Amino acid sequence: MISPFVQLIYHDGTMREVLIKNEEIPFPEGKLIVSRTDLAGIITHCNPSFIEMSGYQHEELIGRPHHILRHPDMPAAAFQDLWDTIQQGKQWHGYVKNLRKDGCFYWVYATVIPNIRDGSIIGYTSVRRKPSRAKVQECIQLYAQMNEAGAAV
Amino acid sequence: MMRPVMTISPDIGPDRIAGWYIFNTWLQKQWGHPIRLELFPSFQKQREAIQRDEIGIIYANPFDAAMLVREKGFKAIAAAVGKSDEAVIAVNVDSSVKCIEDLPITCRAAVTEAPDVNTISSILLEPADITRQTLQSVIADTYVVVAKLVLQGKVDVGFFLAEAYDGLSRVVRSQLRELLRSQIYDIRHVLLVEPHLQAEYETLKTILANMSSDAKGRDALHNLGFTDWEILQQEDTEFMIDLMDTLVT
């Protein structure tokens, strides 16, 4: 029997065992999922839709790294691209499969923007909206290929 | 101090214009300075006046607030408590379209010039692969005309400010069907003051913070359709502008 638990190793070297279920939760109609982090990616603000979709309580999210939502199907290269882009002061867009606390997942179209105040980046805002299913289907294939290529290296 | 010009977003409904004249009178008395209220027939005309630095105080659409703060140095001092700019996408009640994904990529939409409503509505259409490039917009002067175009079958959908949709007559609404309503909460009109009035920011904030404690102030708020003002910190507005930035690109 295949274990529903997977061990994830993050870019900062930390590890976490997460529950994975092959069950998608639909994006809430008409809403935006909004969060803010500090420069290190630690969550400083999240809106009610973020809390609802993540499955965590507000107090479980504030002060935790944003990668708490990272699904193992997401290629590391996608997040590397995200960080490289926003640290240059630019916006990043992409389709992301997020992991919920209960092991289910949800797809989003994410935009991450640096918060620039008096010329300096003081943190990041991420806004997720309902994605196109056609784009999600493309990304399912693309990310699987990227993960395979990464595993083969 | 010269007599500053106060103006309001051109998307404020005609039923609220009298309320803004009452507010203007009330604010002048409380502040002790004359203010001239000037209304513009379009966003374009208003933006031209902003570019000529003619505006001192403005109750602005959130889309314009970004430009006013980042490019012209305005400061947001207050917003209406509990009011946010939400959009409704509506179809003819007899339309076969049951959800956004049923719409064609070349969807025809009746729209006003309200940039916040159009931006939010466009985002709501994205799951159907409808982009700003494929969307065919038909510009209307008012939300009543938007409704008319939907009822006449000249467009697939209409974009409405939720408050304006809810304010349509019962007869008109009975012939429309709400397909989707945004629930964003963080995007709203804000009251901004120009940088030359910087020395007055705190005074104006205090006047607005006490408005609901004053009987005439409460009447004026009622006429604006508000219960009270929420005093804003700079970061509140910066956050909204960042959020808007994620939606327009």
Image: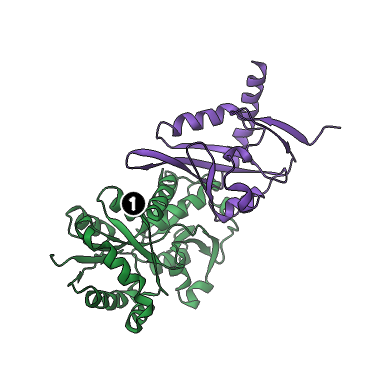
Chain colours: A purple, B green
What is the x, y in percent for residue A133?
60, 42
The residue under the point 62% across, 27% down is A13
* Side (left or right) of B188 relative to B34: right
What is the x, y in percent for residue B141?
33, 64
Farthest residue, direction left: B2
* Quarter of the figure with the N terminus of chain A: top right
* Side (left or right) of A14 relative to A2: left
The residue under the point 41% across, 35% down is A90
Specify the amino acid type for callout 1: Ala
What is the x, y in percent for residue B177?
55, 66
**Could you say which is closer to the camera, residue B211 or residue A28?**
B211
Q: Is residue B17 above or below residue B130?
A: below
Which residue in the structure is indicated by mark 1?
B66
Q: Quadrant of residue B80?
A: bottom left
Dot 1: element: helix
The residue under the point 27% across, 67% down is B203
The residue under the point 66% across, 22% down is A148
* Side (left or right) of A61 relative to B160: right
Q: Is residue B38 above or below residue B97?
A: below
**Could you say which is closer to the camera, residue B213 or residue B153?**
B213
Mark 1: few/some/many CA within 10 Å (<14, 14-19, 20+): many
Q: Quadrant of residue B201?
A: bottom left
What is the x, y in percent for residue A107?
61, 42
Q: Decide if residue A34 is in sight here.
A: no
